[in-house]
Image (tube, rainbow, N blue to C red):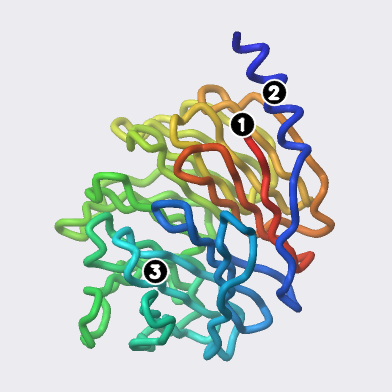
Amino acid sequence: MKTLLFAALLMSAQNSTVLAGHTRDVSSLALTTDGKLLASGSVDLTVRLWDTGSEQSTATLEGHDGEVRGLAFSPDGKFLASGDIYKKVKIWDMASRKETHTYTDMEGAVHGLVFSPDSKRLFAACKDNSARVWNVGSPADSQKLPHNYAVNALAISPDGKTLATMDDNGSVHLWDTATLKKSRTMKHSDNGRALAFSSDGKTLASGGGDSVKLWDVASGSERATAKAEANAVAFTPEGETLVVGTQDNLFLLLSGDDLSLKSKSEKHERPITAVAVSPDGKIAYSSSMDMTVRVWALK
């Protein structure tokens, strides 16, 4: 049965459609928790919203004056956060498609965003050697989680109790979100770029300049590693598959247990910058410096 499943994945991951509309590199993605709306951020200074059913663009959000490198929908679906390289995070109301407020208290570019599961807090990965925390809707400045190097990626556990951050030195830090205190540090490699928790919160995937790794969250021990110049990682909901986008244009499906290769596609023409997976695990999305978003059938 497992062999048949692998064969199906090898075939399906070659089938993709293209969402075109951005005029420069597409650098970030976010998907609503119901999977009905996809957001893409670009070097063209815009955020596009896509209806995932029709695969049509439904709105273009304008107002950034720098490349949009971070995107996150609040789990309750009310807000979209977008962060750019010119030290701004904008909050957009999804009912009106209007900007509600902007955070500007960072000292470096924003390279990643994630909401807490209750939608009450927003976390940002920043190039000013910090992760930032805001109370959503509050005008107050952020709380700062200091790092020794620029923070390139972050992820939050499904229960909201643990924040993971990854810096330019390849260190993966785990933080208690209640106290905002660091609980553990693991070493990936230099040039850390991507993080993702499994849906049960027991496994953390990290991607960097030379490899993808799986970590046991409870112990901090490394479970598996694979060679890949990974820019983006995301688990399928059941945790059986890790979706990886690479610097050398590859869209990979790896086993969620041992990171063995399930599928590889080279349909993107430039590096992949972000990946996302639908809640039902049937669809994956990848953005690229080739100005496109691709939609991949996984099942």
**Disc 2 marks which residue?**
8
**Disc 1 marks which residue?**
299
Which of the pair 55/150 is nearer the observer?
55
Can residue 119 be seen here? The reply is yes
Residue 124 image label: 3
Tag in front: 1 or 3: 1
Sequence-first disc among 2 and 1: 2
Residue 158 x %, y %: 30, 45
Residue 139 lies, with reference to residue 162, above or below; the image says below
The span from disc 3 to disc 2 (Cα, nearest Å) is 37 Å
Question: Which amino acid does the dot numbered 1 rest on?
Answer: Lys
Pointer 2 local density, CA inside 10 Å: few below 14, some 14–19, many at least 20: some
Residue at the spot x=40%, y=80% of the render? 92
Question: Which amino acid does the dot numbered 2 rest on?
Answer: Ala
Q: Are marks 2 and 1 in contact (CB under 8 Å)?
A: yes
Q: Are marks 1 and 3 in contact (CB under 8 Å)?
A: no
Question: Which amino acid does the dot numbered 3 rest on?
Answer: Ala
Residue at the spot x=23%, y=87% of the render? 139
Residue 54 x %, y %: 62, 58
